[in-house]
Image (spheres, grey):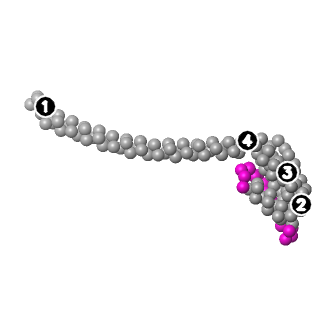
Amino acid sequence: MNQINPLHIGGLLGILILFLFFQLSNIKTELKEANKEYKKNEKLAVDLSSLKAVYADKKRTKKALERILSQASIKKAKLSIQRDKKSMKISSQSIETKVLNSLMGKILNSSYKITSLKIKKLSETKASLNLEIQL
């Protein structure tokens, strides 16, 4: 009675091996999910890094705004421009809608951080504009 049956040892080893294979398959699926999550987070980090590079460059933003405002069609509109260290305020009490459309097309198609935008239609060809862009 004191002897251990070799079939019991073989059965126990078989059950242990099945249990380990089951655990291994679970760990493989968790690893695949973690790998997918890592790739998704890596892509998000690259996107955020590129957005930070675009929005954080104050000199580039200021230079691009100056280039837009110095164009002949926009310059003749006589915009009131106030420059601070952190922002630029552009306003006009009466601006032609064609010039406004051109200005807004250039500003909205670029990457600027617009903190305030108010446009009020005065007539068919005139409007008022208050725009603040953070640098």
Q: Position of residue 22 (x, y in %)?
A: 30, 43
Say which residue label 1 marks.
4
SS assignment at label 4: loop
Residue at figure coordinates x 37%, y 41% from the top left: 27
Q: Position of residue 101 (x, y in %)?
A: 79, 62
The stretch drawn in magenta includes residue 114: yes
Query: Of the residues tagged 3 and 2, which is closer to the observer?
Result: 3
Q: Residues within 10 Å of mark 1 (few under 14, many from 20)?
A: few
Q: Which mark is residue 70?
A: 3
Question: Please, what is the three-letter code of the amino acid marked with disc 4?
Answer: Asp
Residue at the far top: name it: 2
Q: Which callout, 3 or 2, points at the residue further toward the start of the chain?
A: 3
Q: Which quadrant of the figure contains the C terminus?
A: top right
| Front-most of residues 78 and 133 | 78
Say which residue label 4 marks.
57
Residue at the far bottom: name it: 124
Q: Which callout, 4 or 3, points at the residue further toward the start of the chain?
A: 4
Q: Which callout, 1 or 2, points at the residue further toward the start of the chain?
A: 1
SS assignment at label 1: loop
Q: Residues within 10 Å of mark 2 (few under 14, many from 20)?
A: some
Q: Visible in this render: residue 33?
A: yes
Kindly report the distance in space between the C-alpha atoms of the residues bearing marks 1 and 2: 99 Å
| Front-most of residues 62 and 76 | 76
Question: Please, what is the three-letter code of the amino acid marked with disc 1?
Answer: Ile
Kindly report the distance in space between the C-alpha atoms of the residues bearing marks 3 and 2: 19 Å
**131 up-or-down from 14: above or below:** below
Q: Which residues are magenta?
A: 109-125
The stretch drawn in magenta includes residue 124: yes
SS assignment at label 3: loop
Q: Position of residue 24 (x, y in %)?
A: 33, 40
Q: Which callout, 3 or 1, points at the residue further toward the start of the chain?
A: 1
Kindly report the distance in space between the C-alpha atoms of the residues bearing marks 3 and 1: 95 Å
